[in-house]
Image (cartoon, rainbow, N blue to C red):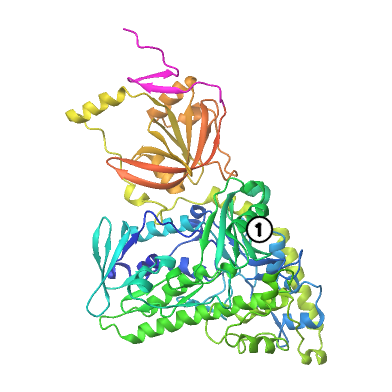
Amino acid sequence: MTASYLKAAFGDRIDITLVESGKVGTIGVGEATFSDIRHFFEFLGLKESDWMPACNATYKLAVRFENWRKPGHHFYHPFEQMRSVDGFPLTDWWLKNGRTDRFDSDCFVMANICDAERSPRHLGGAMLSQPYDEGTEEPQGLTMSEHQGKTQFPYAYHFEAALLAKFLTAYTVERGAKHIVDDVKDVKLDERGWISSVVTAEHGELTGDLFIDCTGFRGMLLNKALEEPFISFQNTLPNDSAVALQVPQDMEARGIRPCTTSTAQDAGWIWTIPLYGRIGTGYVYASDYLSADEAERTLREFVGPSGADAEANHIKMRIGRSNRSWVNNCVGIGLTSGFVEPLESTGIFFIHHAAEQLVKNFPGADWNPVHRDSYNSAVAHVMDGVREFLALHYAAAGRNDTQYWKDTKTRELPDGLAERIEHWKYQLPDSESVFPYYHGLPPYSYMCILLGMGGIELKPSPALALADNSAALKEFQSVHDQAEALIGRLPTQYEYFTHMRRVRRPRELHPVTELIRLNEPARPAAAHPGPVAEGQRAMMSGFPTGVAVLTTADHDGTPRGMTISSVCSVTLDPPILLVCLRIGSPTLRSVLDTGRFAVNLLHGAGRPTAELFASGAPDRFDRVRWEHDTSDPYAAGPHLLHDAHAIADCRVRDEHRSGDHLVVFGGVLRVTTPFPGRQPLVYGKREYRTWPVGPDRP
């Protein structure tokens, strides 16, 4: 994220080298966001259709809290500006005389949209309705802190973090950044104590002027090499561990709830994040109250049979922040800078905010400390404010049935929060009474937590006892009527994102992979290959292989396909296939643009199909029977129904260029066997045969 943001801000006026370990992946937890994240994608010049399908993204309209007050109870913290009537927030009127016992559904349209599991956009792409119309003028070029109070966008995103990281890497590299896959082994300092270079395992010493430490909880540059101390938040936020699962689901049957769900448990809470094709889920807990084995068992019981084969990812979290995130010529961003439990999806927000502040305070040749100090102050304020907001969740929760929850009522609070809570009991939070520095959370967010958690008794303003409530009652009815009208017109999330995949145009400037660099004509085969190449060809002709047709489809539904023999099973955990495709082929371009393909292994009667798809005939799909159900999230390409004895649907995980071919690694989504009893077709000695092959004739 940081590299792409800097490249979008400064273009070729700065040189960026992105060093990424091939052994250490993303933490895989950050799959939900704040609504401010849209400013990040706008800054990069990306539309939703450019990146959302590639990252299996969905909309997030709120955080849904389940069982935090008591079993069976839920409420929403939505992305929606608080309405006011006669100078008082609608929540104040609700405390005096609510329409129902649900503050969220009485005061916010979005809570009702979430309950009905609707998309915030119509199938044609139009947004909800007023007051969320995108046609209204909005200040451009502002930072998140400058936007707060001026606008409230009605949704954020859920996405697969690993896929977004890959997408943004391609975005950054396509704009001139250098990408190195290697491991940093050492950090060298100069006589001033500034970083002069990092030493990598395979690329040696890499020098630079500014080093951005994104090494996660290790803090390899900032905390280790520069010895910047870390400030723990454990005394106020004791959850220090998590176990996560990625669970494939039939999302059409399940539905895609447009919110992140937090479900309280005996020693923490479980998140549920619905994506297009799977859910991300995990148990955040305090290891003082629960073991890792108990946490995993609880999570698997919560998920049910669909998660039985999912691999558990156990994470030990470092809760708190570095004392300073910018030291000398090193800036720590992400987990290196700081982290709190993902209760309000703040991890990616922290990165976005840090990238904004780095651009705003980017150093000049004189390295004026004013910019560094301004950056450190802004980053510290954001993390300290979020710490206070999360601590409020536990202090305000009505749940009190285990030792963990009992201890939340006596646990130490961040400085100033206890006094603020006393104030809020008699006057709901406003801009004057919440944490005084920007931290991404407006006053209405505090109102939602206090009203929803139910553990702190709140009093309505005495002034409302003397006021006429007719306008407030009319506003409650307006919320209800608007919600009912929208629910009747809006599609479900599954309907919306399936439609997006059908109608969106191919990406032109923002490929998931190296589409632009590979968008070149195929090189003709050499008329007179050298003796080594001839020897290799002769040798491999005596190495029989199975025969497959690789299929995919453009974004407009146009099918693509070609015969291949280079198919290899790389690993079963996770399931990955390898295929080799000639650079310049339309099929390869479609695979890279959509990120999906199907491998159809042909049976013995499939020889005509193999020859047809090897010929490149433009009408080849008209001459075979095939099916491609675009509403099926696992259907990665057309299935050749009569000719394949097995079909693997795959999503592109990685690729490597070698000569005039691209090696594509596909994560297997699903395997089907239309004709499991048929013998496979094989190719060797320049002929097709059906397995088992008889002895050669003299």
Left or right of 565 on screen, residue 539: left
Camera-side residue of 677 and 193? 193
Q: Is residue 533 above or below residue 503?
A: above
Coordinates of residue 212 in the picture (x, y in percent) = 35, 70
- Kindly tell me whether residue 250 is visible in this rendering: no
| Residue occupying image coordinates x 30% and y 73% | 210
Q: Amino acid at mark 1?
A: Arg
Coordinates of residue 327 in the picture (x, y in percent) = 35, 79
Coordinates of residue 87 in the picture (x, y in percent) = 70, 88
Work out which quarter of the rendered image holds the N terminus and state it.
bottom left
Coordinates of residue 118 in the picture (x, y in percent) = 67, 59
Instruction: Give the secondary structure at mark 1.
Output: loop
Residue tagged by mark 1?
257
Left or right of 448 on screen, residue 42: left
Q: Is residue 320 above or below residue 437?
A: above
Q: Is residue 696 magenta?
A: yes
Camera-side residue of 72 and 402? 402
> Bounds of the magenta span?
675-698
Q: Residues within 10 Å of mark 1 (few under 14, many from 20)?
A: many
| Residue occupying image coordinates x 44% and y 67% | 217
Q: Main secondary structure of the magenta part?
A: loop
